[in-house]
Each structure stands twice: as structure tokens, then as C-alpha cells.
Image (cartoon, rainbow, N blue to C red):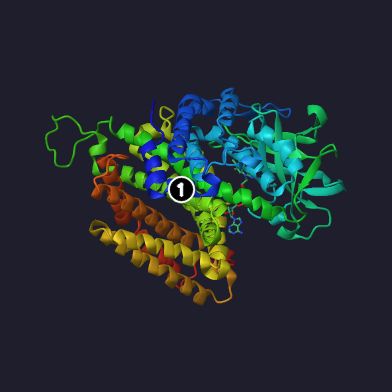
Amino acid sequence: MARYTRMDHIRFLLEEVHNLPDLFALNKFQHLTWEQAWMIVESAKQLADRDMFPYFREMDEHAVHYDGSGNVITHAQLKTIIKHGAEQGWIGGGASMEHGGLQLPMMVFNAGHHIFTAANNGAIGYMGLTAGAAALINSFGTREQHDLFVPNMYSGKWQGTMALTEPQAGSSLSDITTIASPIGEGFYKIKGQKIFISGGHHQACENFIHLTLARIEGAPAGTKGISLFIIPKYWPGDHGLISENDVFCAGDFKKLGQRAYATTHLVFGEQDNCKGWLIGEPNKGLAYMFQMMNEARISVGMGAVSIAMAAYLASLDYAQERTQGRLPSEKNPLNPPALIIQHADVQRMLLTQKAIVEGGLALTMECNRQFDLAHAAAGDAKQEAWLLLEILTPIVKAWCSEQANRSAALAIQTFGGYGYTMDFPVQQYYRDLKIFTLYEGTTGIQSLDLLGRKVSMEKGMALQLLLTRIKETIDEANTHESLKAYSNQLNIEVQNIRKVLEHLNRNAGNDADRYLSDATVFMDLMGCLVVAWQWLKQATSAQVSLSDRNFSRQSQSFYEGIIHTMKFYFRYELPHAEAYAKTLMNPDYLVQVKNKQLF
Ligand SMILES: Cc1cc2nc3c(=O)[nH]c(=O)nc-3n(C[C@H](O)[C@H](O)[C@H](O)COP(=O)(O)OP(=O)(O)OC[C@H]3O[C@@H](n4cnc5c(N)ncnc54)[C@H](O)[C@@H]3O)c2cc1C
């Protein structure tokens, strides 16, 4: 079977770089040991090898489709994937035991989801969505709401969705118009339409629990008037009796990629008979939904590098089989051709991919660790983890998804013409990946969040904390002679961030449009630095094992490969940070918000 992920790298990140074992000292995770946690991750690989990866291409070729009368037809294997995934705890595993979960650290749960996404990204989305929707009910719903919906969601019988987007309101959720009219006891009559709703209807589940944003009649305009509702396709009743709610699936969007994953158009209340149940307090819906969206943003970043990982490994394997041409130093045309991996340019493409996918995966694991600390630690450690997570979330979403697209393009380039054909899977990875820069907030929206909100939040404390953590890694790396040149390089680049921010503040004055006009370039700068931090962290861990000659966990060549890739990132990628800083500090204002005549 072809490779789609690297278990040695996952283990290195969990065990050595991000110290999963020390989480088991926290009360919340005391029921686990490292050995058990690793067995759980290995079981995910077995499940993915058996149920998911063999169907990856087939599920794309036999895409989901709408039957014209309310049903979305899915591949038969989807039901097996959800059933077996649920049985092994891959929907509810991250939830607390009180809520019927396994109380796994997110580092473990998402290590499994990384494997699944690399194996078959179109299929795993259904389970991730249900997990997120159930978590939202657990956090903000009542016990009654939990008991009525969550157990069937965790068993995989019922699908959860997030229903936010409307035809006129995508990036700007403040403009949603779905309306909710009170009918008493926390229930509302719902009327409106939602588009692009993933997993909104399909054949693998019996019921669909739509976590839906709507506006209660008379609510304030904008984000302050948005509430959150549970709108099931079928209402469960006493003794398991079920009645149909007025939720109609009006279509399924045909797409560039992720063709195994339904993207539906839902109509609520066409017969004036759609009932929704308010979660929490009125008008707080968007704040609640942000819990799901923030977790989903980390998952989207992770999902993107997972797919790019599979594309990288496919191209790496191909490069070791395909022969073509000869090295510039070989003058004899009668000598056999070289393997393409021997060409420097092919090595550059492979190393760029490795730097992106392993750097991105390290960053997503950093976020998972901060998520675990934010939920399980106490005092300052908890508060600091929250702050770090706040500032890292838009970066992990935007950087990983953008760079994963670049990485998968290089996978095709490594294949040459064959990569563009349906004979190999890299074209599918490339198609599947594009959506990751769009859903859960586009790259532009993540960048506005980073520069407009996160950088200044809590009087700049989140940014300060991030820079302090980067400095700690720099100091640690500095204790190894072989890493000093790299820690010094990162130190210089990090100093530039303050200069950039001072410049933006000074130059824009009170002009918010101008201040934020290059937010995406600022995102490029921050992403480039944060991933350099993760590479220095990985290289330091690898150097410790190499210096101690401790090869009980990984081989010597594995650690050497990590250090080599760090050097590659610092030589080929990190210098871009200087160019981004230069662009940001240039006084020319070339993307003037109000000047359409330029086109
Ligand atoms: C396959 C798929 C699955 C999806 N799944 C779901 C789902 O399950 N649930 C759900 O609710 N939604 C879902 N979505 C919707 C998705 O989240 C939106 O498409 C996305 O948020 C962008 O909204 P939009 O398409 O309306 O684009 P628009 O908001 O119209 O954006 C168009 C362009 O303008 C830019 N832009 C918009 N506003 C600004 C601004 N203020 N400043 C700067 N630039 C701006 C954007 O960055 C983008 O480049 C899905 C979409 C797709 C395609």
C-alpha cells in the first residue's frame, strides 16, 4: 500500500517535541499512559489502512450527488467508515467522560484525525463535523439537549453540521437573515436558507443535527443579534418516536475537490413548520459558534498539511522510481539515466514539501497542546495557553492551508506530466486542497483577525507571549553549537515584528482601512516566523537525541533528516520574512481600499 503519512514523525512530535507524556500528570488525563496513547494513535492507522485509504480515489470518482428530490447519494463505504470510526471513539473521543467521551487529549485525538485526513479527506470531514457540533451542545446546551442528541451523534447514527453561511452572508456573518420566531419554552419557528452546508444530508446517517445561526425577531442588527439553534431533520420524541421537521435539502454543490463530501443547500421552514431549539442565551450565538469555529480552524490547518503530507509522500516514492536524464556532471549518454530524485531541482521540490508539511504538522500539534493545557491546566499555565491559542489559531489556519496548496502543486511538479493525469493521486490531493483556504474563514479574513484583533488583544499580551515562547526556543537552541547560526537568524527576524507594527501604526494613524490593507502580507510574515520556530524546536529535540546517541525512539537518520530540513527551511524559506517586512514597511500605498479606478 502506498504511504500517506509518517508514523515516525507523528511519534517524534508527540513524544519528543511537544511532550505529550507530561500531559498525563494533569488530573484530566491521568487515566492514560504514553503507551496507551500511542496504541490509540496506532489503532487509527490500522483503521485508516483498512477502511479509508483504499477507498480514497474511488469515492472521488463516484462523487456524492443529488437525486433531485431531497436526497444526497453517497458512496456505500461512507457508512462503514463512520460506523467503525464512531465505535473506536473517533467522534466522541475528545469529549469528557461526563459527556460520554473518552477524555483523550486533543493531541491524541487529532493525531488520529491527521492520519484519517491524509488517508481519505473527503470521508473524515463528516466525523469531524459531528464531533464539533456535539462539543458545542456539551459546552452551551442543557443536559436535556445533550441527552437528546449527543449520544446518537457519538455513535455515528446522527450527523452534526454547522449551518452559518447564507447566499448573501459568507465571510460577513453579521448579515445573516434566517429568522427565528418564539413559540415558547425555548423553541422557535425557523425560516431561511443556508448554503454550502457540509454533510447537511446524506445516506450514511439517519438524522441531521444542524447547529444553526439565526436572528430572533426584533434582535439587534449585526453580530450582536445572532442566536444559535439546534435544528434536527427529525425530532426525537418519547420512546424513540420521531417526527419530521421542515428542513429540506434542495441540492448538493458539484465541486472541484472533496467530491466524497456533501456540500448542501438547506431550506428551513418552506412549509412554515420548522422548529428549532435555542442553545444558551439569545443573541450570544456567534460567541458560542466561535468555539466550534476556532477548533475547526485548527482542524482545517491540520487537515491541509495532512493532505499535503500524502501528496509529498506520493511524489517522494515516485521520485525514487522514475528515471530521467543525467546529472550535469555525467557526459556519457550511454550510461543509464538517473533517478529523478538525484536531480538537485527535484530534491529542492521534495525538501520544500517536507519543510511545509512537517513544519505545518508541528505547528498544528503545538496548537493541540495549547488546547489541552487551556482545558486541563490551572492558573497561569491555563491562561497562557488560551492566549497562545488565540493568536496561533488564525496563523495555523491560513499558513497551513496556503502553504499546503503550494506543497501539493510541487508534488505534481515532481511527477512531471503524469502528476497532472488521473493515473496518479496527486491531482486529487491538489483539487481537494483548494477549499482549505476558503472555508472556516478565508485567508483574507484570518489575516484581518490576526492583525486587527489578535495582535492587540489583552493589550498585546498574546503577541508578547508568543514572542517570549519563540525566544525560549532560540535560547535553548543556542546551547547547541551546531544550531547557533539558526537561532541567531531567527532572533534577528523576530526583532523585525515590532518594527513592522510600529511602522503600520505610525503610517496608518487612525485610518483602519489603511492599517489593515496588507493584513495578508503580515500573515505571511507571521506564518513564516512561527513555522521557523517550530523547525528550530524540532531540530533542538533531534539534536538532543543525536548528542546523547539515544536512538531507542527514532533512528539516527531520522534525526539527521529533521536537522537537515530545518537548515533547508532557514536557507530557502525564512529569508522571505525579510521581504514581507520590507513590503509592509514601504510607504507606498498600492492597495488603496477606496480606489477602484486603478483597474
Ligand atoms: C465546499 C464548501 C464547504 C463549506 N462548508 C460550510 C459549512 O459546513 N457550513 C457553513 O456555514 N459554511 C460552509 N461553507 C461556506 C464557507 O465558509 C464560505 O464560502 C466562506 O466563508 C467564504 O464566504 P463566501 O463564499 O460567501 O465568500 P465571500 O465572503 O463573498 O468572499 C469573497 C472574497 O472576498 C474576500 N472578502 C470578503 N469579505 C472581506 C473583508 N471584509 N475584507 C477583506 N476581504 C474580504 C474573501 O476573502 C474572498 O476572497 C463551505 C463552503 C464551501 C465552498
- From the viewer's perspective, tell me whether residue 354 is left or right of residue 132: left
Residue 256 locus on image (x, y percent): 54, 37
Figure quadrant of the N terminus: top left
Residue 460 locus on image (x, y percent): 53, 69
Q: Secondary structure at mark 1?
A: helix
- Residue 225 figure quarter: bottom right
Q: How many marks?
A: 1
Height in image: 216 above or below 64?
below
Is residue 597 at all visible to an observer of this figure? no
Badge 1, how many Cα within 10 Å: few under 14, some, many 20+? many
Name the residue at 85% across, 40% down: 272
Height in image: 284 above or below 432?
below
Height in image: 260 above or below 487?
above
Figure quadrant of the C terminus: bottom right
Q: Residue furthest left?
A: 332
Q: Residue furthest right?
A: 183
Name the residue at 47% across, 52% down: 399
Q: Between 188 and 590, which is closer to the camera in this rendering?
A: 188
Which residue in the protein does label 1 denote? 365
Residue 398 locus on image (x, y percent): 50, 52
Which amino acid type is shown beneath numbered disc 1? Met
